[in-house]
Amino acid sequence: MIAESCTHHSQEDDIGRVKIPRWLRLHTKRDLDIEVRSGEDFPENLTDYKLIVHCGGCMLTRHTMLSRIKQAKLLGVPIVNYGVLISYMHGAIPRAILPFEEAVSEWKRKTSPAHLQL
């Protein structure tokens, strides 16, 4: 699910409705079933989803955004924001964490072929 907190009219190449779904499909090489929710239309039952990709939440209160994150975490549904997902899919995270040796070690450990097969 892609969750946008605002209710704007989508543009021709909208990030949440067009770009991210396209990048996810290219990255996974799969025809993913992606549902977009906007505004207050955040479902009660998050277990229907394998991943929640959430915008930055600038139209939400801090409390509401933290509540959404907590709800996903309690139900075991991974949640990530647009920026982190985009950075991951475009290969920017390894370069961004270079100054942090522990983060680089953890990244290498988590992305090793042996770990990915678990």
Image (cartoon, rainbow, N blue to C red):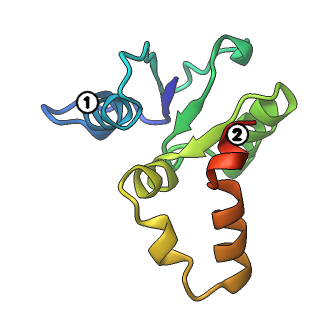
Nearest the eye: 19 or 57: 19
| Horizontal relation, residue 104 to residue 19: left or right | right
Nearest the eye: 109 or 58: 109
Outermost front residue: 114
- Quarter assignment of residue 45: top right
Q: Position of residue 14 (x, y in %)?
A: 24, 36
Q: Secondary structure at mark 2?
A: helix
Q: Label 2 amino acid?
A: Thr
Q: Secondary structure at mark 1?
A: helix
| Tag of residue 18 | 1
- Quarter assignment of residue 110: bottom right
**Residue located at (73% from left, 28% from top):** 77
Outermost left residue: 12
Q: Position of residue 18 (x, y in %)?
A: 25, 30
**Residue located at (45% from left, 76% from top):** 95
From mark 1 to mark 2, how far is it between C-alphas? 25 Å
Nearest the eye: 76 or 45: 76
Looking at the image, residue 75 lies above or below residue 105? above
- Sequence-wise first label, 1 or 2: 1
- Count neighbours of disc 1 (C-alpha within 10 A) and say few if under 14, some if 14 to 19, many if 20 or more: few
Looking at the image, residue 24 lies above or below residue 60? above
**In the rendered image, which residue does mark 2 sit on?**
64
Q: Label 1 amino acid?
A: Val
Marker count (numbered): 2
